[in-house]
Image (cartoon, rainbow, N blue to C red):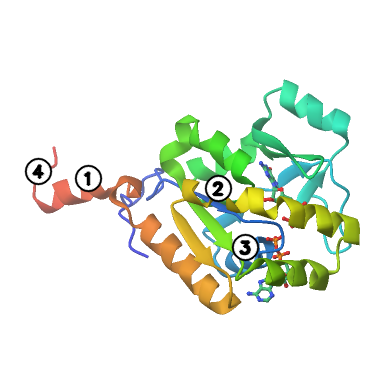
């Protein structure tokens, strides 16, 4: 990708962006984000802290930081979290320090967070770094089939997630992009396209002004 870094400069070529993905539970965010992260070294996952217990395929420190309610409360009190919310009776939050370090180094950060977290990020100084994406399932029947097929949650947990799906979906209008995850490959291609275009935005090309000034012989 084009990048207008000054050779030998410590300044990154581009300001990192905050790529936020939300959806009702089961629509496919985790699957899509794992694929995107695997193929693109320029974007890293913001690993959230949560009080929910780990699933069989989840690793502490990679998928989530699994913490006690007491530890979570300490993180809130000590301003260690950029945003936090209670979802399905558990607490979830974004550790601040790794996000700030990644953005400063020019890396993009992917957030798998709900609408409450997205609204909180929108209210911070980081709002102009945000790219907000909402993922829709084809329909509610398919959403339930996916939650059942994932085989990670008890039936009552699935029922709770289905009961809250409509509340999450009603926030679609607060996002910059709304994608339909019918085919994973199609949706992934759309995510890649959004990421590519957002990276090229003028405001994110830090070295662009110097590059053009030098081209026009106006440096000094
Ligand atoms: N606000 C906020 N929401 C989060 C965070 N981490 C995860 N979530 C959301 O919490 C919800 C439940 O996540 P999870 O228990 O992993 O279930 P899943 O979405 O069905 O895989 C999802 O909507 C996530 O996007 C966070 O750090 N902050
Ligand atoms: N486009 C799709 N078609 C069929 N199944 C899908 C699709 N996208 C995701 N899935 C499956 O649906 C289930 C839920 O996906 P997941 O990524 O865990 O959702 P979320 O993170 O949004 O809760 C998983 O078993 C996943 O393999």
From the viewer's side, name the closer residue of 33 and 144: 144
Q: Is mark 3 within 8 Å of ligand 2?
A: yes
User: How many labels, in total?
Assistant: 4
Lower sequence index among marks 4 and 1: 1
For image coordinates 72% across by 50% down, the residue present is 164
Identify the secondary structure beneath mark 4. Answer: loop
Identify the secondary structure beneath mark 3. Answer: helix
Lower sequence index among marks 2 and 4: 2
- Using residue 98 as the reference point, say whether residue 174 is left or right of it: left
Give the answer, above or below, for where 4 lies relative to 52.
below
Q: Position of residue 208 (x, y in %)?
A: 25, 49
Residue of label 3: 33
Label 3 and label 4: CA atoms lie apart by 43 Å
Lower sequence index among marks 3 and 4: 3
From the viewer's side, name the closer residue of 190 and 62: 190
For image coordinates 84% across by 64% down, the residue present is 57
Residue of label 4: 218
Q: Nearer the viewer, mark 2 or mark 4?
A: 2
Lower sequence index among marks 2 and 1: 2
Q: Which mark is residue 171?
A: 2
Q: Which mark is residue 210?
A: 1
Q: Residue furthest top?
A: 77
Label 3 and label 1: CA atoms lie apart by 34 Å
């Amino acid at each position: 990708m084009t990048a207008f870094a000054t050779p030998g400069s410590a300044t990154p070529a581009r300001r990192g962006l905050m790529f936020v993905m939300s959806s009702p539970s089961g629509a496919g965010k985790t699957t899509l984000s794992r694929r995107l992260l695997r193929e693109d070294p320029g974007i890293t996952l913001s690993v959230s802290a949560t009080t929910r217990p780990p699933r069989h395929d989840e690793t502490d420190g990679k998928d989530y930081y699994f913490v006690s309610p007491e530890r979570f409360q300490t993180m809130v009190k000590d301003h260690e979290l950029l945003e936090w919310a209670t979802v399905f009776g558990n607490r979830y939050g974004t550790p601040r320090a790794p996000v700030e370090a990644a953005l400063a180094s020019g890396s993009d950060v992917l957030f798998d967070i709900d609408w409450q977290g997205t609204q909180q990020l929108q209210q911070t100084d980081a709002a102009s770094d945000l790219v907000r994406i909402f993922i829709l399932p084809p329909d509610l029947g398919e959403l339930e089939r996916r939650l059942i097929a994932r085989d990670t949650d008890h039936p009552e947990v699935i029922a709770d997630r289905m009961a809250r799906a409509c509340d999450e979906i009603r926030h679609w209008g607060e996002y910059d992009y709304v994608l339909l995850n019918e085919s994973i490959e199609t949706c992934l291609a759309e995510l890649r396209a959004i990421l590519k275009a957002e990276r090229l935005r003028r405001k994110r090309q830090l070295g662009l002004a110097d590059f053009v000034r030098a081209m026009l012989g106006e440096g000094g």
